[in-house]
Image: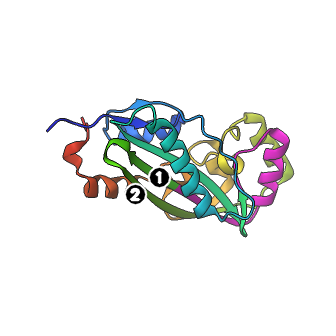
Amino acid sequence: MEKLPVVLASGSPRRIEILKGLKLRFDVIPSAADETIIDGEDAETAARRLALLKGREVAEKRPESLVIAADTIVSLDGELIGKPADENDARGILNRLNGKTHEVITALAFILKDENMEKTVVSKTEVTFEELSPERIEEYLAIGEYAGKAGAYAIQGEGADLISGVDGSISNVIGFPKTDFNRFVIDFGAERLPFE
């Protein structure tokens, strides 16, 4: 059986690294889709919509490929928190998360345009922040790791030191839930995909 080409619709180094670790061969075509959250959208709806939006945009260019897209959103007491605009925004986000438990929601979208297939799965993880001093927040901001990260932290990096507990999948918090991906592969047919 001829293997389907696979495209990751994301330039995220952490998503690329996770997918490589799963031994899948794939191309990377970052999506240029608008990632604006609509007022009144809940986190799961927003993550699903944005993952599909990103995936569809890339699938138009590569209709013969299985396109994998993802979107990660942080939710604190129903307030949706995306990527910080700048350091000051990141400071505000970290202060809001400080000492509290928030939810990280990642949606994966799988699109194969030539077969009119679209599937989405959503993973949720609860993350609890330590009680952080203002000095500790400033030290973290100085590293610059917050840039491009939902919730303004990276759990796979220095941000791990800000966390006191995780209930659920760590790979989901990083932005690519491995369990959901593996479940999709089983349903879709691993033999159709170019695993090493």
For label 2, the crowd category at 10 Å Cα-Cα, with few meaning under 14, some 14 to 19 and many 20 or more, is: some
Q: Position of residue 55 (x, y in %)?
A: 48, 43
* Mark 2–mark 1 CB contact (< 8 Å): yes
| Occupied quadrant, residue 196 | top left
> In this image, 183 relative to 39: left or right?
left
At 33% from the left and 36% from the top, the residue drawn is 64
Q: Nearer the viewer, residue 179 or 80?
A: 80
Q: Looking at the picture, does residue 44 appear above or below residue 2?
A: below
Residue at coordinates 34% horizontally, 37% vertically from top-left?
A: 65
Residue position for label 2 = 180
Q: Looking at this view, name the residue that lies furthest to the bottom.
A: 77
Residue 144 location (% of width, % of height): 73, 35
Q: Position of residue 103 (x, y in %)?
A: 62, 64
User: In the shown orientation, is residue 91 left or right of residue 18?
Assistant: right
**Type of amino acid at the residue the image marks with label 1:** Leu
Q: Is residue 83 magenta?
A: yes
| Label 1 sits on residue | 108
Name the element at disc 2. helix
Span of residues in magenta: 81-106
- Answer left or right for 8 relative to 194: right
Residue displayed at 75% across by 44% down: 84
